[in-house]
Amino acid sequence: MSVRRQAAPFLRGRAARPAGGKTARPSRRGRAGISLRAAVRGALDASRLAAATAIAVVCVAPLPAQTTPQVRIPAGRLEGLPLRGAPQGAAFLGIPFSAQPVGDLRWRAPQPAPHWSGVRQATSYGPACMQTPSGWLPEMLGIRAMHTSEACLYLNVWTPKLQSAARLPVFVWVHGGGNVEGSGEWPPLGATLAKRGIVVVSLNYRLGVFGFFSSAALNAESSHRVSGNYGQLDQIAALRWVRDNIRFFGGDPARVTVGGQSSGSLDVCNLMAAPLARGLFRGAILQSGACVDSITASLKGGEEMSARLVSDLSLPAGASMARLRAVPAERLLQAAAADKQIDLEPVIDGWLLPQQPALVFADGRQAAIPVLVGSTRDEVSIFASPLVHGSAYRPQTLAAYHKWLKDEFGGFADQVFAAYAATSDSQVPRIFRRMFTDYDFAFGAYLLAKENADAGLPAYLYNFDAVGSGPFASLGAFHSEENMFLSQRYWTSWVKQPSDGVLSNAMIGYWVNFIQSGSPDGSGLPLWPRFSADRPLCQRLGKNIGPEAVPQVQRLPVFQRFLNARLQAWKAAGR
């Protein structure tokens, strides 16, 4: 991602040059890739046209009042919904975990949520954080846009046993969407995992310009002399809320696992590297996203990106924060979306992220917890698919492939081509898909597992390779597909196969086992070996389930060499 933006929901990547062939600013991955956010911008623009007439809010249908559950937490009493299939369970939706970041609280660290009197209804999701409509929503949710608001810091809780003495394991989900889209509403893991004995929490966090804007003026306001990273601070605030409140819902604050997919996974990886998040979770599940395989931007880089936005708004460079906070949220959102060079992401700020996460993990200084991590076999295929209005650039000739590699890898281009060589134009699309999937996803998952294992910590690596039928058949095992099997909520055009249920139940079993014990093994499932660099095995998750050698492992060292060179350059620059 250009300082690693994920473009569409549950999308992560630093894609290629746009179809017009213009070279974009340096990416977090390499030197000339652009984010997939820009590659699918046309789809987002088309979706905006339909937003006014197609906004939907998904709620859980209430049962009769006499069966409505209630819980008291320090902030006040909540009334939720019965959890179907779990007689002692309940769902509580739209709980504020922070003061809403509006007005003077825009671009400030999250503040404590206010208390309330009486009984607060917790029977429908709160609004998603500000974002433009996504071309993925019709497939994923059957809608064209979500209800959004700048006042969006809400979380949701599903519990199988609403008793404070239950002390059940807890899973906190960080949604994907490139840190510009998504909400705690998707994927609907809550009810599925709660019925297996897990207390589930999903959350919203500030996105895009609202979550990652930085400036010298904001630095001056901060006691830590930093800005940006507000979205990740929201995630930490939600984890602290879980620590302080989850026991009232039957959860054990000492048994919290945090997980995410795509940018949500990358954010979880950052939390493992962040001292502020230490002690808030004891395990992590990372699906198709890692912070160990590339370079995170500096605070100065984030400030330069934000300054471009101020210019786009036709405001003077020295505009006061009061003036910037007075800009309507919709105007900020549209200005950021209209400029293809604006890509606001987490930054190395010296406080939340004191150092490059890649260096933290390489030195074994990450949170000392077990991880379950992996990717799908054909991650990037979906990004160019009309099913999600994708328009990601794909080189079609040898000449275009060589140019892409040179733009992205510079002096390492020939080495990458040697590892992923094509001999004719007709081979380029297939080879590029393999190379880009490995570069953007498989390498990061492998490296994270290896570095956890090198630190003497448990790591479990997977390769998801289930292939759909119908319109999805040509995409292989694509980015975000595994969420359908984990939530048992399938996309609109998905054609179910008899094997889907078997894989779904196995994956849910593995995830539940890991959340409960820190290991996916048990429940009569095929043995999943712990990862070891000396014997690099992963678990194949598809029509066949079981251990296998890590695919493409012999090709991955070229990406390690490229990463090492960039990390050396970072250190040499004294950052």
Image (cartoon, rainbow, N blue to C red):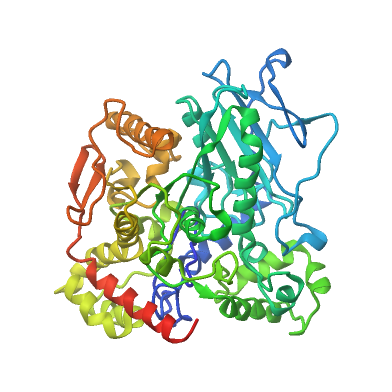
Answer with left or right where residue 540 lies relative to residue 95. left
Answer with left or right where residue 544 lies relative to residue 358. left
Task: Spot the residue most to the left.
Answer: 423
Q: Quadrant of the N terminus?
A: bottom left
Q: Position of residue 112 (x, y in %)?
A: 75, 49
- Looking at the image, is 473 positioned above or below residue 422? above
- Looking at the image, is 158 positioned above or below residue 538? above
Q: Position of residue 423 (x, y in %)?
A: 14, 74
- Looking at the image, is 121 positioned above or below residue 282? above
Let me know if residue 532 appears in the view. yes
Q: Quadrant of residue 83?
A: top right
Answer with left or right where residue 107 lies relative to residue 297. right
Q: Quadrant of residue 439?
A: bottom left
Task: Spot the residue most to the right.
Answer: 117
Give the residue drawn at x 63%, y 70%. Answer: 336
Answer with left or right where residue 426 lies relative to residue 262. left
Give the residue drawn at x 72%, y 13%. Answer: 66
Let me know if residue 421 appears in the view. no
Q: Position of residue 242 (x, y in %)?
A: 61, 40
Q: Position of residue 487 (x, y in %)?
A: 45, 35
Give the residue drawn at x 50%, y 28%. Answer: 194
Residue in front for this viewpoint, 427 or 155:
155
Residue in front for this viewpoint, 260 or 269:
269
Label tally:
0
